Amino acid sequence: MRHLPSLAPLCLCLGCAPDLREDRPADSLPQDTDTGGLITDGETRTLTVNATAVDVWVYLSLSDGALVSPADPLQDDSWHLALQRYNLAVNGGVSGAGGVEVAPVEGRELDGLTAAPADGWRTDLADADGDGVPEYALGDWYEYDATTHVLTPADRIYALCDGAGACFKLSIEGYYDEAGTPAMLSLRWAPLPPR
């Protein structure tokens, strides 16, 4: 019994999650094709994407509602979002040539967004803070609880437009599946009129 107090700190450490910044951006951006199945409700689509691999990016075309496997993701405009763990890249800026930009919209009501905002547009930028990770346009999609080590979607949705003029409204619905597996990103989106 006298050893129990000395085991308490060890037990506390067992519940700690790994540092979220150990995921590294992939220069070659490999891909995966594992999804949880597309659900369509009118024009709104919902998809759970398995982005659990640390070294694999998964590419999603919002237009097609499907994962794609671009031969050269940095030059291919067939994808809108790339997912790797909690990182979400857009096909624009330093992440791709698709001209994708996003604009955050406060609140969680996807149906309430009926037109692309006039301002607030941004795309993926080169690393500005020296952490070796680009400044992703969707980098603020989550809130992290340092006590519980849990990611939850922030109180915002996004408008997203690509270089060809297609626009969408996007909600990141969750990071965990029903079993609690992280990096099983649930996304919901619908088309928006061009801006």
Image (tube, grey):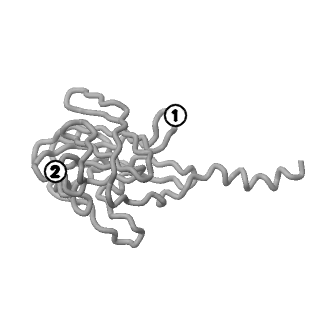
> Which residue lies at the image location 35% right of the left edge and 57% below the top edge?
139
Q: Which mark is residue 100?
A: none
Q: Which mark is residue 179?
A: 1
The answer to whether residue 184 is left or right of residue 179 is: left
Q: 10 Å neighbourhood of mark 1: few (<14), some, or many (≥20)?
A: few
Specify the amino acid type for callout 1.
Answer: Ala
Query: Disc 1 versus disc 2: distance between alpha carbons?
Result: 34 Å
Is 90 above or below relative to 127?
Answer: above
Mark 2 or mark 1, which is nearer the start of the sequence?
2
The answer to whether residue 185 is left or right of residue 169 is: right
Instruction: Name the quadrant containing residue 65.
Output: top left
Where residue 187 appears, as percent x and y from the top left, is: 33, 40
Mark 2 secondary-structure assignment: loop
Specify the amino acid type for callout 2.
Answer: Asp
Q: Which residue is mark 2?
A: 162
The answer to which of 177 and 28 lies nearer the viewer is: 28
